Amino acid sequence: MDLTLKTIIEFREEMREFRIETRKTLAEHSHRLNVIEATIASLKADVGVLLSSVPVMNERLDNLEARVAALETRS
């Protein structure tokens, strides 16, 4: 077999292996990115719930401060 032909055949096999490995790596990265994206979406929803409760918490703290101030003036 001609040396050039042998080299081309070996190179073709190496490229095939490289493509298989690259596809596998890209699939793994894609999966990881999907997990990260889902986690971010979940965190975004959780933050939305927390932020919606802040005004209620502020109102309750204001009421509590007013009650404490009223109690302090009685003493």
Image: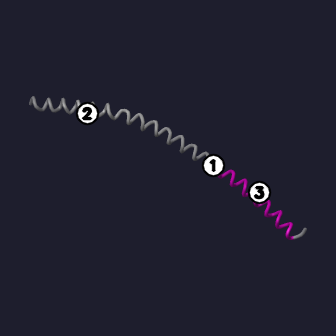
Q: Secondary structure at mark 2?
A: helix
- Which residues, given as a range, are shown in magenta? 3-26
Q: CA distance from mark 3 to mark 1?
A: 19 Å
Q: Secondary structure at mark 3?
A: helix
Q: CA distance from mark 3 to mark 2?
A: 66 Å
Sequence-wise first label, 2 or 1: 1
- Residue in the picture at 27% in, 30% down: 60
Which residue is label 3 attached to? 16
Amino acid type, mark 1: Glu
* Label 1 crowd (10 A; few <14 / some 14-19 / many >=20): few
Residue 17 vertical position relative to residue 71 in the rendered view, above or below: below
Which residue is label 2 attached to? 61
Sequence-wise first label, 3 or 2: 3
Please state the horizontal and vertical placement of residue 44, each as a whole percent of the image: 46, 39
- In the rendered structure, the answer to whether residue 32 lies left or right of residue 64 reads right
Please state the horizontal and vertical placement of residue 64, each as a whole percent of the image: 22, 31
Residue 21 vertical position relative to residue 46 in the rendered view, above or below: below
Quadrant position of residue 17? bottom right
Which residue is label 1 attached to? 28
Amino acid type, mark 2: Leu
Q: Main secondary structure of the magenta part?
A: helix
